[in-house]
Amino acid sequence: MKTILKIGLLVLGLIMVALVVLSASLNSLIKTGVETMGPQILGTPVTLENVEVTLLSGGGALQGSLTGLLIKNPKGFHTDHAISLPNIHIRVDRNSVLTDTIIIDEIVIDHPSITLEGSLKGSNLSTILERVEDFARPGSTNGSGEQGTSEARTRAGAKQVQINHVIVKDGQINLSFTALQGRAITLALPDIHLRDIGKESGGISFQEASAEVFEAVYSGVTKTALGSGKLVEGGIDKLTAPVKDLGKAVEEAGQEILKGLLKEF
């Protein structure tokens, strides 16, 4: 009896070790995937500090958290980043992982920092959005001249996804323009709640889901900037004050860029 008990404990221990190893491997794979596919989809560097996936979650759910996801700006912009996501919590239907359509029950993005930097050529976010939409469009190039049937697109689109809830909460917007070399004013981003992404069609590609989420965030950012009224007008004065010594032309150019950027949407 003792022998059977020892064998049972040994087997249980081996299973626990295997789960730990599998979890660590999965964390590494996710981190590598984000940092590899992110730049191909967004057209700008993407880094991720840490991934934690829990395989032992109850209720048929796979829990995960991503910390320190940073999306850098496209070339030509001077603020620190386009999007900083310090905390992302994900809950996935564990039974769907091995099927053709992965069902993500919930994605919660907590305290994002999103920078809208305008220039004479447009904004950093519109540049990224154009790349995302182009990547998600079948048969199009991905911004680097590669066709939509490229190996990168094939890997990214191997599975479909359905996302039941995406919640973006307690975020902030940093409003700037390129001539100020990184200075910005801060606005609060209203919470965003998206539902049933890909549900009606039985799943969509990860590229299409990414585009839908990014478009919603982009819309929230630009609507907030548009609706900020006097706050933005006052912020423009604050932004231009530190560069007045550079001449009246720079000050007026900065005001025109910001006002023109807001009218664009």
Image (cartoon, rainbow, N blue to C red):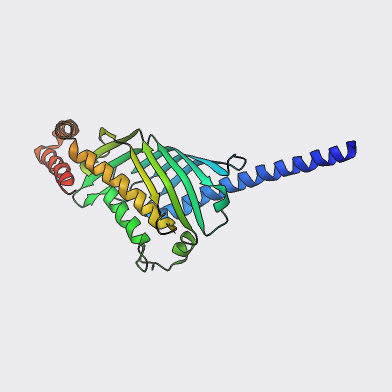
Q: Position of residue 125 (x, y in %)?
A: 29, 48
Q: Position of residue 40 (x, y in %)?
A: 41, 57
Q: Position of residue 230 (x, y in %)?
A: 14, 32
Side of 134 where 37 appears, left or right: right
Quarter location, residue 134: bottom left
Label tally: 0
Q: In the picture shown, does residue 108 fall above or below 205?
A: above
Q: At 64% from the left edge and 47% from the top edge, which residue is drawn?
A: 22
Q: At 43% from the left edge and 56% from the top edge, which residue is drawn?
A: 206
Quarter location, residue 239: top left
Q: At 37% from the left edge and 39% from the top edge, which residue is drawn?
A: 168
Q: Position of residue 59 (x, y in %)?
A: 58, 41
Q: Nearer the viewer, residue 28 or 205?
A: 205
The quadrant in which the N terminus is found is: top right
Return the residue found at the far front: 200
Q: In the picture shown, does residue 191 fall above or below 121?
A: above
Q: Nearer the viewer, residue 261 or 88?
A: 88
Residue 180 visible in this rendered orientation of the protein: no
Residue 169 visible in this rendered orientation of the protein: yes
Side of 183 where 158 appears, left or right: right
